[in-house]
Image (cartoon, helix red, strand yellow):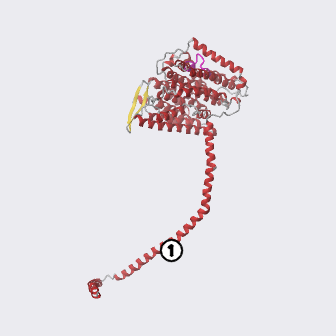
Amino acid sequence: MTEWLMHPALLMLLGALLLALLRGTWQKVVSVLVPLLVLISVALLVPGRSGQLSFAGIDLVMFQADPLSLVFAWVFSIMAVIGNIYAWHINDTGQRVSAFLYIGSAFGVVFAGDWFTLLVAWEVMAFASAYLIFASANRAAVAAGFRYLMVHVAGGVLLFGGIVLHGMQTGSYLVGPLDHGQGGLAYNLILISFMLNAAVPPLSAWLTDAYPEATVTGAVFLSAFTTKTAVYVLIRNYPGAEVLIGFGVAMALYGVVFAVLENDCRRLLGYHIISQVGYMVAAVGMGTEMALNGAASHAFAHILYKGLLFMGAGAVILMTGRRKLTELGGLYRTMPITLFLYMIGALAISAFPLFSGFVSKSMIISAAAGDHRAAVTLLLTVASSGTFLHTGLKLPYYMFFGKDCGLQPPEPPLNMLLAMGIAAVFCVGIGIFPQLLYGLLPYPVDYHPYSGAHVTQSLGLLMFTLLAFVLFLKYLDPEKTISLDTDWLYRRGAAVFMWIARHPVLLWEHMVVTLGDGAGLRLLHRLSRVSLRIDTQVVDAAVNGVAQTARRTGMLLRQLQTGIVSHYTLAMIVGLIVALAMPLITGLALP
């Protein structure tokens, strides 16, 4: 019973219920205290199983903890604390409750020991996170929220179908590595569902479509949980699935290329989520212990530095009301603390030495090199250079420096700066003391990121990227354009569907209606009049005739009922005489 009470998912769900009942300062206090309690509960967890039961002949495991799940639980709980401190200033109960449900369901996925528990948490996560987009309460956000929800519901349907087929094939519904040698429909349905949540192109457009439209605080939570739970389930169920290597490398490059074209600061950061998750997906495909450690460690580091980047961008949006790079610039004068903290996140994602990204991303690239995958190593290194170019140089230059936009916004509220500061401490702390992170990883770590060759190579690549930025700065100016992504396909597909509905289908409907209102309707009227005549002149006449005959017969018989016994006796005698006489009369009549 004690284990259940300390289940992080249960604590977050109970916290959501409590937040719905509170208002004002008490609600804010509880929104931070509950994640702190969750952090303590994660520290007290030990590997094992609980909540095992059988339902309809299916074995369920509601809670399963091991080193892999604990890595993600640690960073999820840390980010829950940071995110709720960042959101302290808001007075929106709906956002707080949905954030708690979202985080709680993410814990549910991480600790699920069976497929059905995972599925329920997976779907709750989708619906709860969608509210953080709807909460912006504008037309673009509502439209993006519905698209986000439809995509994730479709992914949930694929996951459910794959789970059912998998259970029918194997007889087990327990979560664990799937046999990629067998493949099969169940294997592919589940994989596609996970890839959708991981934002693997071409299934990635939902992320860059929805995240920029979320609330300032909601986008911070979105950046941390959805794609990283997908990375977790890929590590758990698809280690060594080599198809993921190609997808992962494509993701890493895809995000960098599209970031070149982007003018919206949060959309640009969204593309770099895709790029960074690509490293993790590729590592899962490699499947070696070092690669899987790299995927888990990079997910840990990514949640913190990407959260910091979204917090920095959100602070600018909150204080200026603008999010386009072409509308910003010169903010370093009045927002120097925000700039400083943002740059820590930017250096971390760029894998600068002494920052968290350096000790996690390099593990994946080294795993690729150690697995003799030269092309993968080269392409991931190139993608890392592009990350520094856009997130570490382009975005902060045009947002905080560049052409002065004429705005003089103050620093954001203290709680936002505090949350950013905590995330920045983790980004630097992990970079300086990587063994703190390596000690949490699921497999033994024999990797030393701060070798002379590795540091020199990384700094050389970063300095070359900085030189290229300075030389080609005028070609990197953001433009007031909208980049077309793979969402063009379903946007245009929806437009084609509506055209079909409004033209061929509507024309057919008009033809049917016109036919019905014309000759068809007149024919129906004539048939109904003929039917009325038959009913009144034939059917009703026959029924009325039978009724009249029965009535007259009844009246006649009624006159014979005098009530005098002698009359009835006389009638019986007459009847008897007639009955006896009939054979005699019949016999005389015969020749």
Q: Where is residue 47? Give x, y as percent.
A: 42, 24
Residue 279 seen from this side: yes
Which one is in front, 411 or 105? 105
Classify residue 48 as left or right of residue 152: left
* Image quarter of residue 90: top right
Classify residue 335 as left or right of residue 302: right
Residue 359 part of the magenta segment: yes
Residue bounds of the magenta highlight: 345-361
Residue sticking out furthest to the top:
452
Image quadrant holding the C terminus, namely bottom left
Give amino acid for label 1: Gln
Which one is in front, 515 or 528? 515
Q: Which residue is disc 1 drawn over?
A: 537
Q: Where is residue 369? Give x, y as percent.
A: 54, 18
Magenta segment's dominant SS is helix
Mark 1 falls on what kind of element? helix
Residue 307 seen from this side: no
Classify residue 590 as left or right of residue 212: left
Image quadrant holding the N terminus, namely top left
Residue 87 part of the magenta segment: no
Q: Where is residue 408? Give x, y as percent.
A: 71, 27
